[in-house]
Image: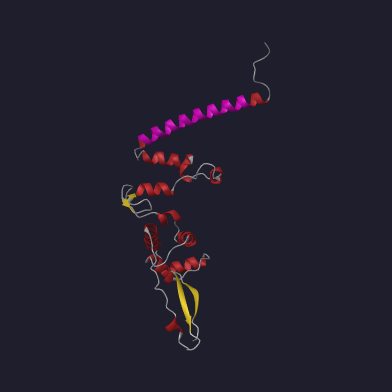
Amino acid sequence: MASLYISFGVLFSETSVSVITVYHRPWRSRKIRDIVPIMATRPIDIGDVGRTVAANVTRYRKRRGYSMRALAEELTTNGRTMSASAISQIENTARRVDVDDLFAIAVALDVTPDLLLMPEAHSGDDRVPSVFGETAAARIWAYLRLDPPPGDPLNEWWVDPQQTPTALMAKLFASLGDDPETQSKAQAGLAGFIGELVEVNTRIREDQAKNRHGGGGDGDD
């Protein structure tokens, strides 16, 4: 009796990996579609973060005034080739967004990657889906904006532009409102405070200069 040979192979697609079994019958020639049973393609499982990214791509694309084709062209110009069909699949959660896609799309839309990861919310108390479960929007944004951990090289050179003295001063005066008298008092108080700091700094520098030149004492006893 003729032998039955069995071999195994793997089919790869963008969405799944399917194992196939091919039966070779030496005594009979049959079409491949008749002898290759293929497992059904598994649907892509997009979680809460993936759905947030998809919704944000749509939202920021429209805010930018881009069609899907225009966004695809911008991505291609920037070196990340992607078709309008791929953009459509992303926005309809039919395609995953890898980290390279995420960064490239953020650049093309002139936003930061963390904005694409942030669920849309109109207040910090809004409940939004996340990997933590449904939680306050403020918690998600605070997490996305965390400072680097201690010891990270980023801490050696990075300064948040929103935390520079100039930025903090601008926030302070903006919080005072438009009342001229209030603004004037604040500016006068700030000028006095800065004057005191300058005096203290000057004295410290003078003392340091004396110590470097051995002039720390007032004279011999």
Quadrant housing residue 106:
bottom left
Determine the main secondary structure of the stretch shown in magenta. Answer: helix
Could one spot residue 67 in this view of the protein?
no
Q: How many dots with numbers?
A: 0
> Which of 28/45 is in front?
28
Residue at image coords 43%, 49%:
144
Q: Looking at the image, what colour scheme do you see?
A: secondary structure
Q: As drawn, which residue projects farthest toward the front?
A: 1
Left or right of residue 142: residue 220: right
Residue 187 seen from this side: yes
Out of 160 and 95, give the one closest to the viewer.
Answer: 95
Q: Position of residue 48 (x, y in %)?
A: 36, 57
Q: Residue furthest bottom?
A: 28
| Most distant residue in the top direction | 221
Q: Which residue is at a point 36% across and 35% down the rendered structure image?
A: 182
Magenta stretch: residue 196 in it?
Answer: yes
Identify whether 76 is placed above or below 189.
Answer: below
Expressed as whole percent of the image width and height from the top left, the position of residue 195 reads 50, 29
- Location of residue 47 in the rendering, given as x and y in whole percent from the top left corner: 38, 59
Is residue 207 on the magenta stretch?
Answer: yes
Q: Quadrant of residue 173?
A: top left
Question: Residue at point 41% right, 57% down?
Answer: 116
Residue 186, position as x, y percentages in the image: 40, 33
- The residue that appears at 40% across and 38% down in the rendered structure is 172
- In front: 160, or 217? 160
Please report the bounds of the magenta region as a residue range: 181-208
Location of the C terminus (image quadrant): top right
